[in-house]
């Protein structure tokens, strides 16, 4: 008997495209000798003392569930860290929720805040999950294009153009994946003013906040600005700065009523984050700063190298202020982002992600991740330069 499965799948899910990143890298799987500048994952192994904390947790038999909110000791460490780094104070027992990665935190935050048809504004190019996460929460995704000339930062005047009476939430991500963009205090103050004026709630994903390279410009969280803590969910985690992607651990800090709403969804879906990961995260927050600084210095050196080489080969590239991505402009080659990436892979064995995977405003650009070894980066740039020279 023939079964028409298209009629069985929920409409809002059937209409969501597959991740452009994952689709592209399925093509890479199984190919020999490919240099990957693609997946946004640190090439560093999780520092030993953090891994040791996870091993010790297992040895001591810590294999149980935890509180839905997370281990109290971890929540206290998170509250201290957020106070010291982001300059925002949260109550560890009622305003901090430990999640299974920041991805879960985004999902449950959106589901806790929006009703069907509410508009959620986000800036593009952006991480591939933002728009689908909004749709899966029955919201309406509203993208604001950012521009190369502005370093791909969100300008308050551009945000103002898309705000309507249906606007409910603004999603921010600085430093940004895929562009490495950062936001100035001045721009964030302008954005905060609009949020207060239009009663918008803010989801700020600051997973790359430790990876900023201009020592004269401290990271500023919109949650720390006057009048914003009470209308902001601060999302952060351990994957990027601490090189703990496989531990799948993030957290959300928010006013108690919002944390409680998110916790309801969390307890009926995920229940709690893995206890071994939580215990490792305590060690990361308490003693991981020296390794974070070393990794940041390495990324800084790689960023400078890639930006210089890309500009030398004629691919105009701004110098990103954070994260571990460069976003060169490939429009002068006459190729689309996808064609450029596919030919670069086929002809030179270098994998990078088409900018179009990150929204329509990413067309004409290429995301290159420099969380990979320096020798591979040098070889990849030599191969890319050879490829561009043939166009």
Image: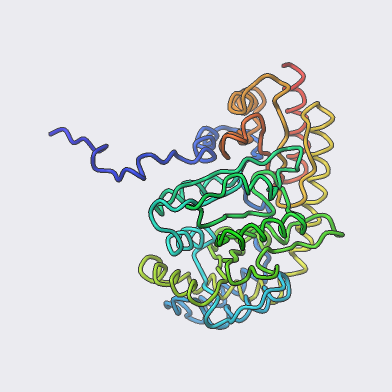
Query: Is residue 339 left or right of 264 when viewed as pictured?
Result: right
Residue ID at (49%, 64%): 100
Query: Is residue 259 left or right of 145 when viewed as pictured?
Result: left
* Farthest-out residue, top: 390
Pick the quarter of the image with the C terminus.
top right
Q: Is residue 101 above or below residue 167?
A: below
**Tell me, what colour scheme is on the image?**
rainbow
Pick the quarter of the image with the N terminus.
top left
Query: Which residue occupies the foreground of this view, 385 or 72?
Result: 72
Q: Is residue 78 above or below residue 235?
A: below
Query: Which residue occupies the foreground of this view, 8 or 248?
Result: 8
* Farthest-out residue, right: 216
Q: Position of residue 14 (x, y in %)?
A: 35, 40
Classify residue 241 by image quadrant.
Answer: bottom right
* Farthest-out residue, left: 1
Residue ID at (56%, 38%): 359
Query: Which residue occupies the foreground of this view, 176 or 293?
Result: 176
Q: Is residue 343 above or below residue 217?
A: above
Residue ID at (62%, 55%): 172
Q: Position of residue 362 (x, y in %)?
A: 62, 35
Residue ID at (58%, 40%): 358
Q: Position of residue 107 (x, y in %)?
A: 46, 58
């Amino acid at each position: 008997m023939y079964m028409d499965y298209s009629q069985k799948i929920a409409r809002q899910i059937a209409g969501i495209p597959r991740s452009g990143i994952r689709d592209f890298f399925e093509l890479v799987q199984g190919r020999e000798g490919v240099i990957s500048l693609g997946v946004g994952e640190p090439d560093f192994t999780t520092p030993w003392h953090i891994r040791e904390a996870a091993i010790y947790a297992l040895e001591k038999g810590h294999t149980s569930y935890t509180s839905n909110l997370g281990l109290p000791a971890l929540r206290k460490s998170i509250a201290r860290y957020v106070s010291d780094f982001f300059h925002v104070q949260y109550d560890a027992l009622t305003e901090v929720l430990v999640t299974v990665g920041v991805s879960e935190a985004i999902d449950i935050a959106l589901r806790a805040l929006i009703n069907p048809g509410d508009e959620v504004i986000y800036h593009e190019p952006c991480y591939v999950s933002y728009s689908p996460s909004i749709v899966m929460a029955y919201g309406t995704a509203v993208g604001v294009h950012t521009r190369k000339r502005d370093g791909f930062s969100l300008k308050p005047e551009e945000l103002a153009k898309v705000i309507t009476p249906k606007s409910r939430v603004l999603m921010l991500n600085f430093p940004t994946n895929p562009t490495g963009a950062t936001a100035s205090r001045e721009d964030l103050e302008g954005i905060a003013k609009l949020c207060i004026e239009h009663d918008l709630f803010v989801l700020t994903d600051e997973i790359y906040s430790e990876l900023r390279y201009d020592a004269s410009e401290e990271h500023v969280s919109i949650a720390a600005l006057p009048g914003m803590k009470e209308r902001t969910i601060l999302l952060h985690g351990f994957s990027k700065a601490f090189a703990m992607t496989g531990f799948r651990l993030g957290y959300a800090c928010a006013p108690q009523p919002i944390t409680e709403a998110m916790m309801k969804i969390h307890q009926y879906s995920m229940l709690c984050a893995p206890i071994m990961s939580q215990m490792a995260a305590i060690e990361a927050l308490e003693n991981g700063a020296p390794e974070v600084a070393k990794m940041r210095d390495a990324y800084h050196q790689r960023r400078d190298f890639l930006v210089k080489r890309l500009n030398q080969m004629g691919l105009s590239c701004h110098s990103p202020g954070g994260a571990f991505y460069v976003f060169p402009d490939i429009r002068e080659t006459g190729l689309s982002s996808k064609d450029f990436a596919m030919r670069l892979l086929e002809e030179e064995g270098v994998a990078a992600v088409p900018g179009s995977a990150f929204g329509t405003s990413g067309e004409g650009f290429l995301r290159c991740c420099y969380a990979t070894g320096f020798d591979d980066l040098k070889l990849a740039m030599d191969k890319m330069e050879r490829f561009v020279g043939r166009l």
